[in-house]
């Protein structure tokens, strides 16, 4: 957990070795709890381990219904944990009010809001200072000292998630603190998220990267169609020779995906589409490349934009964005279709 843009998703991807969380320079990129699973091989006397990381949305004081849902994801994650990592952007001085100010009813900064959650925990809390490559050592030590005065952290680990500096130390310390038990996930599984959700997030990542101002925060993506290619039967096709020499690789199977991008105003829709559709095409092209890398197939991606006024304040609409609820809805529809088929 940590403030927006502390580098939590960058750390998760670096640890797991797969892209399980989208990463941009914009705050509040992550909206859901995201699980990443790391298999730790045995080393010396240390046995093998499986660590289940739960990446949470950036901690902030909620303003909209969407913000409140994001903070609920944080609280839900904190209820089921053995260790908590408080991730801090080391290049930014935390805003901590004076003790006397708090006694006089000082409302508190966003940084103090994060610490207030930490102080309620009854488990080991690691202080991880990220982006140490962007700060001088003489600036770093006073920031660590100020935070240690706020809470008795079990471990203090400086690192650069982007440069993968400090990851091994973090993993070693976590294995020492985590309880022994059975595996939660099969060794080959690196996340609990279904491919549909990962695809929606990759599209949203491109929106965050391609647009500015309020558009990224007023945008949501819903997968309307996800048609996987039929299972491959028979012998795998081999590369075949082509004129002029060389070999042509066989075509990969095709996944067909249709997605709706929701925004709140007509002006936002115009920005998302762009003049002559150029912006929507750029979003689709960038997302398609990432999705093809994820799925290992060719991808036909169709995008369209829908205006849903005030969706960030609509609890009903926000509920439909939850991939867990989406899976439940799909299962219910499939059950109804099966019942109708048997009756017929």
Image (tube, rainbow, N blue to C red):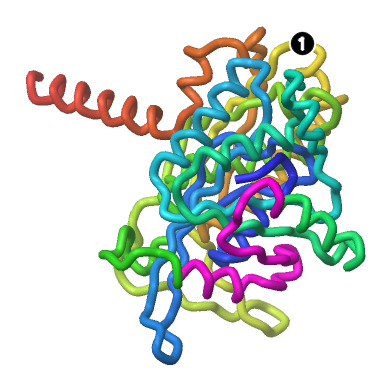
Q: In this figure, which residue is indicated by the disc labeled 1?
A: 266
321 or 165, nearer to the observer: 165
**Outermost residue to the bottom:** 44
206 or 50, nearer to the observer: 50
225 left or right of 207? left
Q: Quarter of the image containing the N terminus?
A: top right
Identify the residue shown where x is 74% and y is 59%.
130
The correct choice, above or below, for 121 with respect to 225 in the image is: below
The magenta region covers 148-175
55 left or right of 245? left
Residue 171 inside the magenta-drawn segment: yes
The correct choice, above or below, for 141 with respect to 275 in the image is: below
Q: Can residue 298 be seen from the camera position used here?
A: no
Callout 1: SS? helix
- On the image, which quarter does residue 303 sit in? top right
55 or 173, nearer to the observer: 173
Give the image location of residue 259, x and y in percent.
57, 31
- On the image, which quarter does residue 281 sit in? top right
The correct choice, above or below, for 142 with respect to 199 in the image is: below
- On the image, which quarter does residue 233 sit in? bottom left
Give the image location of residue 119, x and y in percent.
57, 41
234 left or right of 117? left
Q: Quarter of the image containing the C terminus?
A: top left
Identify the residue shown where x is 74% and y is 11%.
265
**Outermost residue to the left:** 343
Identify the residue shown where x is 42% and y is 47%.
228
Q: How many labels does the image show?
A: 1
Residue 344 inside the magenta-drawn segment: no
Q: Can residue 337 be seen from the camera position used here?
A: yes
């Amino acid at each position: 957990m940590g403030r927006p843009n502390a580098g939590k998703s960058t750390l998760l991807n670096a640890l797991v070795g797969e892209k399980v969380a989208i990463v941009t320079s914009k705050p509040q990129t992550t909206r859901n709890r995201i699980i990443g699973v790391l298999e730790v091989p045995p080393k010396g006397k240390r046995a093998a381990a499986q660590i289940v990381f739960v990446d949470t949305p950036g901690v902030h004081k909620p303003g909209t219904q969407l913000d409140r849902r994001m903070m609920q994801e944080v609280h839900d994650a904190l209820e089921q944990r053995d260790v908590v990592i408080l991730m801090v952007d080391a290049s930014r001085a935390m805003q901590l009010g004076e003790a006397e100010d708090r006694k006089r009813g000082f409302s508190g900064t966003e940084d103090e809001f994060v610490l207030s959650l930490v102080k309620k925990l009854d488990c080991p809390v690691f202080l991880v200072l990220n982006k140490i490559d962007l700060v001088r050592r003489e600036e770093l030590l006073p920031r660590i000292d100020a935070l240690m005065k706020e809470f008795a952290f079990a471990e203090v680990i400086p690192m650069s998630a982007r440069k993968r500096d400090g990851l091994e130390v973090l993993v070693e310390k976590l294995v020492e603190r985590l309880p022994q038990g059975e595996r939660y996930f099969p060794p080959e599984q690196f996340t609990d998220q279904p491919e549909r959700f990962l695809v929606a997030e990759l599209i949203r990542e491109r929106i965050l990267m391609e647009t500015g101002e309020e558009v990224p925060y007023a945008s949501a993506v819903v997968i309307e169609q996800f048609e996987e290619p039929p299972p491959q039967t028979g012998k795998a096709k081999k590369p075949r020779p082509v004129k002029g020499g060389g070999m042509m690789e066989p075509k990969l199977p095709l996944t067909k995906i249709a997605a709706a991008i929701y925004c709140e105003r007509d002006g936002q829709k115009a920005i998302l589409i762009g003049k002559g559709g150029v912006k929507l095409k750029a979003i689709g092209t960038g997302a398609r490349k990432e999705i093809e890398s994820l799925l290992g197939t060719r991808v036909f991606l169709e995008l369209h934009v829908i205006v849903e006024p005030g969706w960030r304040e609509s609890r009903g609409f926000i509920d439909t964005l939850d991939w867990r609820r989406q899976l439940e809805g799909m299962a219910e529809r499939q059950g109804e279709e099966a019942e109708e088929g048997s009756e017929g």
